[in-house]
Image: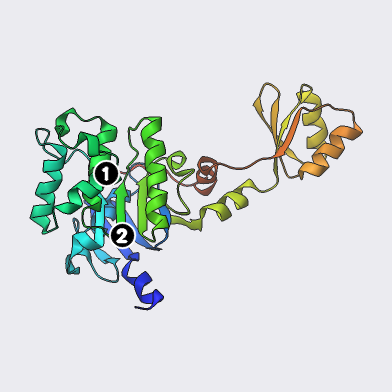
Amino acid sequence: MADNETTDEMTIEARGLCKRYGDTLAVDALGFRVLPGRVTGFVGPNGAGKSTTLRMLLGLDAPDRGQALIGGRPYAALAEPLTAVGALLDCEALHPGRRARDHLLWLAHYSGLPARRVDLVLDQVGLASAAKKRAGGFSLGMRQRLGIAAALLGDPRVLILDEPVNGLDPEGIQWIRGFLKSLAAEGRTVLVSSHLMSELQDTADHLLVIGRGRLLADTDVGELLDAVSGQRVALRTARRAEAMTLLTGAGATVAMTGPDALTVTGLPAQRVAALLGEQAVPFSELSRHRATLEEAYMELTAGTAEFASAEGVAS
C-alpha cells in the first residue's frame, strides 16, 4: 500500500460540520484534518464545541450539515470500527462492581476481539497489577488508564481522546503525556481534546483551536510559539522604574511581571542590554521570552466574544 493511501486511511477529517441545539449553534462550519504520526491537540474553552465535534466524528451525533470522516468514511461505514478507531469519551462509563480485566474481556467479546488483547493493553497502560481489582475502587487516574486500555483493545491506528488528563494528579498527567507521544511515534493518529492549553504544553505537536464552534487556528505548535514569542525579552533588575523609563523611551512596551521582573516587547535582547549598559542600569537576568501555549491561546482569542455556550448544551 502506498504511503499516501496509508495516511488517508488514518486521517480524521471534518468538512463544514454544523450542529445546532435549539437556538444554539454548537458547531459552525468547522473544517480540519488530523494526520498520523503526531499528537494533535483539540483545544477550546468549555462550550466551544469540542465534545460535540468528537461525538460527530464517532457517529454518536449526526451533523446537521457537513461530513465527519475517518479514513475518508463516516464512522458508521467503517467495516471494523473498533480496529480502526479507539476512543475515550467518558472514563466513568463502566460497571463499578466489575473487575478491570473482566470489564475489558466483556468489551472484547462483545466486539469480536481476541481475549489475548486484554492482558496486552492492561500491561500497556500500567494496570496489569490491578487487573483483578473492581473498577469501583479505582482512582480517577486508574479509571482513565482503564478507559485508554479499552480504546486500545482493537489495536486501532486512530485514537480520539476527550479530556484524558481531566482531574489527574501530576504523576498521572506525566504518564499520559508520555504515553500519547509514544502512540504517535508508532505512526498512529492521536487527537486529544482539552479546555486547558497548559495540559498540552509538552505533548501536542499540532494544534486545533476552536471557539463558538469555529476554527480559530490550525497550526504547528513550535511555529505558533515562535510567532507569539516575537521580540519579547524577560528582564530582572533591582532598578525597575529606571529601566522601564529608559526602555519605554526607546520605543519598547514594558510590562511588570514581578517585584524586580519585566517583560520587554519591541526590542531585541541585544539592544535592551546595550541601552541598560549605556546608562549603567544593572540587571541580573536578560533572556528571550518563550511564550507558553496559554499565552498563545490568549493572543489567538483576544478581542473575540465570550465562547461559553448556553447552559445544558454539549461542549
Image coordinates for residue 108, horizontal then vertical, percent: 13, 53
Residue type, mark 2 in image: Val
Residue 186 in the image: above or below residue 297: below
Callout 1 crowding tier (Cα within 10 Å): few <14, some 14–19, many ≥20: some
Locate the N terminus by quadrant: bottom left
Taking the image as shown, residue 201 lies to the left or right of residue 58, namely: right
Q: CA distance from mark 2 to mark 1?
A: 20 Å
Mark closer to the chain start, 2 or 1: 1
Towards the viewer: 49 or 272 = 272
Reading the image, the residue beneath label 2 is 158
Do labels 2 and 1 touch, CB within 8 Å? no
Quarter of the image where the C terminus is located: top left
Residue in the picture at 18% in, 48% down: 118
Q: Residue 210, which numbered label?
A: none
- Per the image, the residue denoted by label 1 is 123
Kindly state the secondary structure of the residue where label 1 is placed: helix
> On the picture, is 311 further left or further right than 305?
left
Q: Measuring from the top left, give residue 280's x and y in whole percent.
A: 89, 28
Q: How is the image coloured?
A: rainbow
Q: Residues within 10 Å of mark 2 (few under 14, many from 20)?
A: many
Give the residue displayed 21% in from the left and 30% down from the top. Answer: 138
Tell me the quarter of the picture where residue 63 sits.
bottom left
Residue 315 visible, this orientation: no
Asked if residue 78 can be seen in this view, the reply is: yes
298 to the left or right of 74:
right
Q: Is residue 93 left or right of residue 235?
A: left
What secondary structure is marked by label 2?
Answer: strand
The location of residue 135, given as percent across then percent down, is 16, 34
The amino acid type found where label 1 is placed reads Asp
- Disc 2 vs disc 1: which is toward the camera? 1
Residue 25 is situated, as x and y percent measured from the top left of the image, at: 29, 53
